[in-house]
Amino acid sequence: MSRTALVTGGTRGIGLAISAGLKQAGFAVAANYSGNDAAAKACEDAIGVKGFKFDVSDFEAVGAGIAEIEKDLGPIDVVVNNAGITWDAPFHKMSLEQWQKVISVDLDSAFNVTRQVWEGMRERGFGRVINISSINGQKGQFGQVNYSAAKSGLIGFTKALAQEGARKGITVNCVAPGYIDTEMVRAVPEKVLESIVSTIPVGRLGKPEEIASICTYLASDEAAFITGATMTVNGAQYIAS
Ligand code: CAA
């Protein structure tokens, strides 16, 4: 029987590529999304992965969403905590709402989702948790104190939880993408983005599939000895130690 994977924010951008990669590798995949019904329908039409609508920043809503997924597809063996937003501003202009919204969607979500599948993974002696961090959680980014804090927080979350899952067959890893060709990155002002791309030694934005392939590997049985790691995938823009 195939394993079941949940990809948060799994109907668009990097998440869509991750959903497609896992589906192709034989997983039964559920793609969570928060609001864009048209994108969810397009995802189902294109790759045959159904969307499940709930807000990952709301613990109760996540619980209900997970119950629905498990009823449909069986117990969740793999979680990819991918859902994330940006709301950039220099710190002196950043509102409390900008701070709280980004922290809750990008960081609290990892608790809300993982906590509610964790006991099942422990009982079954198998699990894969993959947290999508960012180059900007590793190096910090001007205009992204909120996002950099959340994405850096995911790295600490990963390192601690990996130690707790290790004896139970559960691996917990981070993937830290650089600038990938998605709507989120294309929303950066053109001039700013041009100057960012000029600092990527590989000379281009990354592709969503280049993030998806590492996630598929981390989800596999073969990756059982990789845990607590942060996989940097950024075209050498920032070489983390
Ligand atoms: N380093 C130093 N100074 C910088 C700077 C930088 N990287 N970027 C801008 N500045 C300076 C400008 O030169 C300007 O200085 P002066 O006031 O002295 O002229 C000042 O900051 C700009 O101030 P503004 O009041 O005009 O700023 P703003 O309100 O227009 O906001 C910004 C600017 C929103 C931060 C804009 O620079 C921006 O969007 N930056 C890109 C942030 C970014 O990389 N976001 C990534 C989104 S994609 C993503 O996050 C995915 C992922 O994981 C990689």
Image: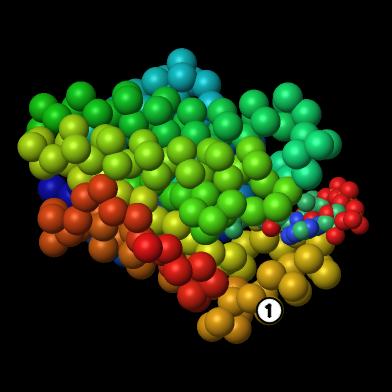
Residue most extreme to the front? 241
Q: How many marks?
A: 1
**Is disc 1's CB within 8 Å of ligand 1?**
no
- The color scheme shown is rainbow
Other residues around mark 1 within 10 Å, as few (<14) / some (14–19) / many (≥20): few
Type of amino acid under label 1? Ser
Image position, residue 76 (x, y; %):
26, 36
Q: Which residue is more in the foreground, 153 or 207?
A: 153
Q: Which residue is mark 1?
A: 198
The image position of residue 159, as x and y in percent, is 29, 42
Image quadrant of residue 129? top left
Is residue 103 in sight in this rendering? yes
Residue 227 as seen in the image, left or right of residue 194: left
Q: Residue at x 75, y 74 (%)?
A: 194
Viewer-side residue, 39 vs 60: 60
Task: Give the SS element for disc 1.
Answer: loop
Q: Give the residue at x 58% y 45%.
A: 148
Instruction: Give the x, y percent position of residue 12.
Output: 56, 53
- Above or below, 83 relative to 195: above
Q: Looking at the picture, does residue 215 appear above or below residue 154?
A: below
Identify the residue shown where x is 73% and y is 48%. 143
Residue plotted at (18% across, 32% down): 164
The reply, left or right, for residue 44 in relation to residue 24 is right
Q: Nearer the viewer, residue 74 or 81?
A: 81
Can you say which quadrant of the picture contains the C terminus? bottom left
In this view, 35 is above or below 61: below
Q: Position of residue 226 (x, y in %)?
A: 19, 56
Instruction: Decide if residue 10 is in sight here.
Output: no
In the picture shown, does residue 218 fall above or below 128?
below
Front one among 202 and 217: 202
